[in-house]
Image: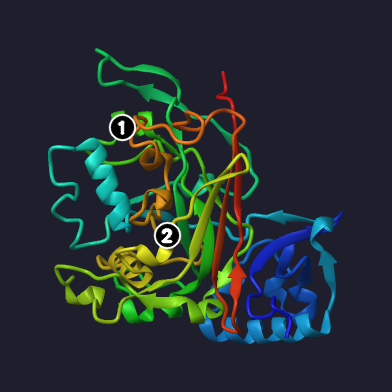
Amino acid sequence: MSPELPHLPYGVFSPAGQAPRVGVRVGSRVLDLHVATGRSVLATGSLNALMALGPDVWAEVREQARAAAEADTMSYALEDVTLHLPFEVADYVDFYASLHHASNVGRIFRPDQEPLLPNWRHLPVGYHGRAGTVVPSGTPIVRPSGQRKPPDADAPDFGPSRRLDIEAELGFVVGAGSPLGQPVAHDDFARHVFGVVGLNDWSARDIQAWEYVPLGPFLGKSFATSISHWVTPLAALDAAWVDLPGQEPRPLDYLAPDRARGLDIDVEVEIDGEVVSRPPYSSMYWSPAQMLAHLTANGASLRPGDLFASGTISGPETDQRGSLLELSWGGKEPWGEGRTFLEDGDEVVLRYSAPSTEGGRLTLGEVRGRIGPAVR
């Protein structure tokens, strides 16, 4: 069996001079799913129509894709096609689900206090982001400008961020929606979530630090969020589910703590060709299904194309920290050759892998972004 067949991630591509359509990646080639299956929902430039049809259709299309891949039906070389944003983002929510990341941030900013705020172990903390600035891998990232106020300054000024950062995350793509006023139960996660993407939540730490009290992140994060071109379907991750490291105190029943599970997904953070961190997603405190259950606990509805992210993935070791804020300990402990935060021209690459259902590991979609200067 080809090692690519257990994966078959979905994306949107266009051959030269042709309109975008849905495909699956098979190694270094892209299979045209509309030609392979005859389904009109796959002749569009977005996965949303397919995702809206729900898990029974997802399973049927995956079987058709696998059969077509084995027969090598109507595929293109990857270098001969243009890749696009794989789905239209409806809403975007970013969580804060890593115990190690949240604890590190607390120690950096509140060294004389408890690192975690009182609610953190009771609910998955999150904020509502900006769907319109979610961009596909490879999109240049313009350094954002905004208000900055260093601790020793009397007043803020306006200018380019001096503390531009990454956040290595995993994104979850909602397929089937839900009615307004009806929470989605923890155990219905797979009925609504279509798959996962790699995600970089770019963050301007100096802008964020001045603006976030009392309502949380705003302009320090809304300028860009990068995701992979390829969406790995949940079915490809059947071998990746693992037990959570542990939750104490026991979360409330709607978060189903006795059934909550995490994912064995390894992340690699590379900056200008140097691997600076390898965060393990298996170390996350809150599970994907718990995040979705909490997201809808108040009756908030889901729509096809909703995206929710894990928050920065950080492990317990220094070389497992998923942000430069942590790697440089707030800019006080430079990494590499005296580096703290991102400089213009830096290229960041996030890579992901997970266990395959057929043995070995799958290579999930990578996320690239190069920093360009602020607009003057």
Query: Against 352, is 269 above or below?
Result: above
Instruction: Tell which of 37 and 323 is nearer to you.
Output: 323
**Display colour scheme:** rainbow
Q: Distance between the residues labelled 2 and 1?
A: 23 Å
Q: Element at badge 1?
A: helix
- Residue at 12 percent of width and 41 percent of height: 113
Q: How crowded is mark 2: few (under 14 residues within 10 Å), some or many (20 or more)?
A: many
- Residue 362: x %, y % from top left: 60, 71
Outermost residue, top direction? Answer: 154
Give residue 111's quadrant in the image. Answer: top left
Mark 2 belongs to which amino acid? Answer: Phe
| Quadrant assignment, res 62 | bottom right
Can residue 231 be spotted in the picture? yes
The first of marks 2 and 1 along the sequence is 1
Task: Locate the N terminus and report the quarter of the image it occupies.
Answer: bottom right
User: Does the CB distance between marks 2 and 1 fall below 8 Å?
Assistant: no
Please name the residue that numbered disc 2 is placed on: 308
Above/below status of 279 relative to 191:
above
Q: Residue, x 54% and y 29% (percent of image)?
A: 343
Local packing at callout 1 (Cα closer than 10 Å; few below 14, some 14-19, many 20+) is some
Which-is-in-front pick, marks 2 and 1?
1
**Closer to us: 75 or 303:** 75
* Residue position for label 1: 209
Number of on-image labels: 2
